[in-house]
Amino acid sequence: RTIRLEVARYRPGEDAEPVFQGYDVPLMADWAVLDGLNYVKDQLDGSLSYRWSCRMGVCGSCGMNVNGEPRLTCGTFLTEYGEGPVRIEPLKGFPVIRDLVVDIDDFLAKLSSVRPWLIREGEELPLTTEYAQTPEQLEAYKQYSMCINCLLCYSACPVYVLDPDFLGPAAIALAQRYNLDSRDMGDRFDVLNLDEAVWGCTFVGECTRVCPKHVDPAEAIQRYKLTAALRSILPWSKR
Ligand code: FES
């Protein structure tokens, strides 16, 4: 048995519009969509371009739109789609470099903008102190540290698709990963308290729904809205 993949092919500058190319691949019970693409690349058409690395839901590089839904293609089985066809497109909301490969430079800049590291003040380097945490202190930010930067939440976000300046779910969740860490002394109010940041979110919640790692960026955003609102009446409040 085979299943048909309809794969978006696009080379900006060469092709006027993306076109869909059909490939029939074996429908195996243990094959993910990524296995189907690898079959195409190895056996049918070596010119197909897409990203992947770990094949086990860790690296975050294989995100694509599969039948209209942002999915990790290494964790999405072909058998989910019955007899097919399976339509595979690049993640929505990002410029396409070629075929299924999108440009993530803007996303990486957004991650950096939230200062994603533990900020300490008044300490000499190198640090020799150990900063132990209780299980409760770890639990406060742990879910946000599970993000693998797969971009699915951006592709699902109706705000980001309309406004590329929106800081977006993963970057705000990353900021909260540090804001809620008991070892962090930083202040990210300047990058979060903006119309293009937490106040741009309309709380549709699609980011949380599509996250393959069960991170809840929608909650992170709503929580920081409360922090920012409190800060307007209690200026010394940081968290
Ligand atoms: Fe690494 Fe899919 S290939 S997450």
Image: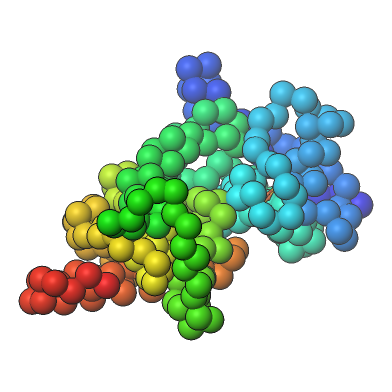
Residue closer to the observer: 27 or 223: 223
For the point 71% across and 42% down, which residue is it?
A: 53
Coordinates of residue 44 in the picture (x, y in percent): 83, 30
Name above or below for residue 16 compared with residue 212. Answer: above
Comparing 37 with 51, the one in front is: 51
Q: Nearer the viewer, residue 156 or 10?
A: 156
Q: Residue furthest bottom?
A: 136
Q: Is residue 1 left or right of residue 95?
A: right
Q: Is residue 16 above or below residue 149?
A: above
Residue at the image position 31 percent from the left and 74 percent from the top: 223
Left or right of residue 98: residue 3: right
Query: Looking at this view, is 140 or 196 the one in front?
Result: 140
Tell me the quarter of the picture where residue 184 sits: bottom left
The single residue placed furthest to the left in the displayed view is 233
Question: Can residue 163 be seen in this snapshot?
Answer: yes
Q: Residue at x 65, y 35 (%)?
A: 50
